[in-house]
Image: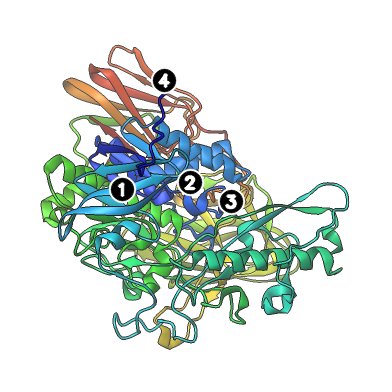
Amino acid sequence: MQIDNSKSKRALRTIRQSSDLVVVGGGLAGVCCALTAARQGIEVVLIQDRPVLGGNASSEVRLWALGATSHMGNNNRWAREGGIIDELVVENIFRNPEGNALIFDTVLLEKVTEEENITLLLNTAVFEITKSSSDSIKSVTAYCSQNSTTYKFEAPLFCDASGDGIVGFLAGAAFRMGAESADEFNEPFAPSKEYGELLGHSIYFMSKDVGKPVRFVPPSFALKDITKVPRYRNFSVKDQACWMWWIEYGGRLDTVHETETIKWELWKVVYGVWDYIKNSGKFPEAANLTLEWVGHIPGKRESRRFEGPYMLTQGDIVSQRSFHDAVSFGGWAIDIHPADGVFSEKPGCNQWHSKGVYQIPYRCLFSRNIDNLFLAGRIISASHLAFGSTRVMMTCAHTAQAVGVAAALAIQNNWKPADLLVDDRMRELQQRLIRSGQYIPGMDQEISTDYQLRASSELTLAALPFNGPWVPLEFGTAQLLPLPPGPIPVFEIEVKAEKSQKLEVRLRTSTLAGNYTPEVELGALIMELGAGVQRVKLDFNASLDEHRYVFLCLSENPEVSIRCSESRITGLLTVFNKHNRAVSNYGRQEPDPGIGFEAFEFWTPERRPRGYNLAMTIDPPIKCFEADNILNGRNRPYIQPNAWVADPKDATPELSMDWSTPKEIRKLIINFDTDFDHPMETSIWGHPENIMPFVVREYEIFDDLGNCIYQKSQNRQTRNEILFETPITTSKLVIRFRHPSENVPAAVFGIVIN
C-alpha cells in the first residue's frame, strides 16, 4: 500500500451517495420511519450517531418504550400502537419477556439490516447541510469517527428524527424551545417561569446481587450532600433503571449545547445516590449489591420543537379533536416535569390524562418553511404542553411511520410533503397507512369484496363459564362488554358474601362511543345478599340506541367475592377502579378547574395471569362476533370487538371466500389479536407470556381443489402478510384455524385479498 507522506494538508475519505429519503436519527422514530418507507419501495439512508439503534430505548439509555397504553394505567383500552412498532415490540416480547435492553438492540438491528432498501450508518453524525434553494435541502454531510470517513448524501426528501433537530436547525427550519404562554394557544396548564420551561435529561443505573458483601468507594465527583435530593427520604433498593426516571436535571439549561454539563451533574447524582444506599447504613439489604451499570449518555426529554403548518395543543388532546389529515394518535398523559428535576421539592412529574386517545394531524409532521423536510420523533410540531404527551417513544415511532408512507407517496408522484394535503392524496395516504397496520382512531380501512364470505361458526356469547377463581371486591370491579342496539340483556353472576349485606351494581357507558370512561349511568341495582355462595340476577330494564361498550360495575366491598371465568375472548376485558401511581392514577382525576382538564374515574385492567373475566350468563346472548366483522376495516376493538370469533366448540374453525369466477391472488393480509391492551414495555418490566394468549398460532389455506397452498405454525405476530411468488388462480379460498387454547377461541380482525 502506498502512503502519501507529503507535508501538505490531507483530506478525509469522502463517500457520496444519492437516495430517495435520508432519515437522520436512529431512535425508534427514525427506525420505524426508515423501515416503513423502505417497505413501501423507496431507497432509504438511515444515519445514526450512536453505535446502536433505539435511542432512549436502546441499551445505552434503557428506558422502556411506552405510549398510549400508559402502563395500563389510564382509560385507553386496546390502544397499543400498530404497524411496524407493533411488529417490533411483539417480536421483542417473544424473544425477551424479561425486558433485557441488549436483546431489544438486536431486534432493531436485525429488522433494519434485513431490509435491502435501507443503507444503515452507525456512529455517524450529521454536521453540515447544503441547500438547493433558500427553502429546500440538497444534501447532508456526516462523519463516522470509527472509520474516519465523511459521507455526503443527496436526496429529494429528508426526515429529521434526530431528537435535537440537527438537520432542521442547520437548514433554517422554524423551531421553538421552552414553554409557550397560556395565552398563545389558550392552554391554561402552561407552566410558569418558576416551574420551568424545559424537561430535563435522565441517567439510569442498575445493580446486581453477587451473593456476598460488596463495598463501594465513591468517586471524588459523587454528590456528597444527599439532602440536596429531596427524594432521598423515599429511596428503595428495589428501584433501579427507569424506575428512577426522576433522576433528572437540566431543565433550566440549554438542553442542546449543555448536554455534557447536564450529564456530569447526573453522574454526580447517580454515584451520590449509590454511595448513600451502600454506605449510609440505612439499607442493610444492599450489602450484596454491586453497581452493575450506569448510563454513559443521558436520555433526553426536550430540546427543540419544530413548527409545521399546524401545532398540536393542550386543547386538541383534552377534547380529542378530529382532524381531516389525521395520520396517527397519542394517549400518554400531558406529562410535565419541574425544570429543577431531581433537586426540586415539587413532584417529579405532573400527569393529567384525557378521557381517551387523540388524533395527530399530518400537518405536524413537516416543516412549514423548508419544503422537503419531514419531522419525526419528539421534534414534531406541538406546543410545549402537547409535547408533554407526544414525546413518548411509542407515540413517536407510530407517528414516524406516517412520515415513511408519506415520503414513499411523495417520491412515487414527485410531490413535496405539503402536496399530500389535497383531499384525494390525503385519503390515499391514510388508506395506505391503515393497510400497513397503522391505527388512526375513527378511520376505517376501505375494503371492497367480490366474494361471498362464510364461517364454519360464530361465537354467540351466552355465558362466561363459572370455572375461575373467586376474587374479592377490593376495588370497584367491572366487566367491559360489547352490546348491540336494543334492550340490555339480563345478566346472572355468582357471588360469595361473608355475611348478609347489600351489593351495589351499576351499568355504565362512555359519553363518546370510542372512549372507555364509565361516566354515563344506564341503570343501578341494590342487591340483597345472604351469607354464602349465591347466584344474582341483574335486570337493568334499559336499552341502547347504538353499538356500545358497557361497564357492568360492582362496587368495592372486600366482604364480597365474585366468581370469575377461565375463558378469555377477543374484545372482552375486566377493569378495576384502582390506583396506578406510576402514571398519577389515584382512582379518580380531580384537576383544579382552571387548568383545562376534566375530572373522571380511572377503570383500568390488571395484567395476566390476573384480570379474569367475570363469570356470568347473558340472556339474550350477545351476537357481535360475526364473520362480517373482518370486512369493516377496523383491526382492533373499537366501539365493538370488530373480530370474527369462532365458537369454542367448533373443532376446526374456518372462513371461506367464494368467487363466481376464478380469481388471481397475489397477496393476503390477515390481522390477528395480539392483545392491543398489553403495553409491551421493551425493557426492565417483565411480561407474563412471550406469545399473547389471543393470537392464532396455526392456520392453513386451501384452494378450490382442496390443495393446501400455505401453512403457518408458531405465529406470534399481529399482521401476517402472505405473498405468493407465483400468483394463484382459484374460485375459492378456505382458511382453517386452530384455537389458541382450550379457553381462548380463534379470532381474526381482518383479511385483505389482493
- The reply to whether the C-beta atoms of the residues labelled 3 and 2 are less than 8 Å apart is no
In the picture, which quadrant includes the C terminus?
top left
Please tell me how crowded label 1 is: few (under 14), some (14-19), or many (20+) other residues with Cα within 10 Å.
Answer: many
Q: What amino acid type is highlighted by mark number 3? A: Ala
Is 237 situated above or below 126?
below
Circle 4 sits on which residue? 711
Q: Which mark is residue 573?
A: none
593 sits to left or right of 568: left
- Between 300 and 645, the residue placed more toward the observer is 300
Which quadrant holds residue 222?
Answer: bottom right
Calculate the distance from the C-alpha at mark 4 to the C-alpha at mark 2.
23 Å
Q: Nearer the viewer, mark 1 or mark 2?
A: 1
297 sits to left or right of 44: right
Q: What amino acid type is highlighted by mark number 4? A: Gln
Calculate the distance from the C-alpha at mark 1 to the C-alpha at mark 2.
43 Å
Please tell me how crowded label 4 is: few (under 14), some (14-19), or many (20+) other residues with Cα within 10 Å.
Answer: few
- The reply to whether the C-beta atoms of the residues labelled 1 and 2 are less than 8 Å apart is no
Circle 3 sits on which residue? 615
540 sits to left or right of 400: right
Circle 2 sits on which residue? 675
- Between 719 and 126, the residue placed more toward the observer is 126
Calculate the distance from the C-alpha at mark 3 to the C-alpha at mark 1.
63 Å
Calculate the distance from the C-alpha at mark 1 to the C-alpha at mark 4.
47 Å
Farthest residue in the front direction? 7
Please tell me how crowded label 2 is: few (under 14), some (14-19), or many (20+) other residues with Cα within 10 Å.
Answer: many
- The reply to whether the C-beta atoms of the residues labelled 1 and 4 are less than 8 Å apart is no
Q: Nearer the viewer, mark 1 or mark 4?
A: 1
- Sequence-earlier tag: 1 or 2: 1
Q: Nearer the viewer, mark 3 or mark 1?
A: 1
Circle 1 sits on which residue? 141
Calculate the distance from the C-alpha at mark 3 to the C-alpha at mark 2.
20 Å
Is 186 situated above or below 217?
below
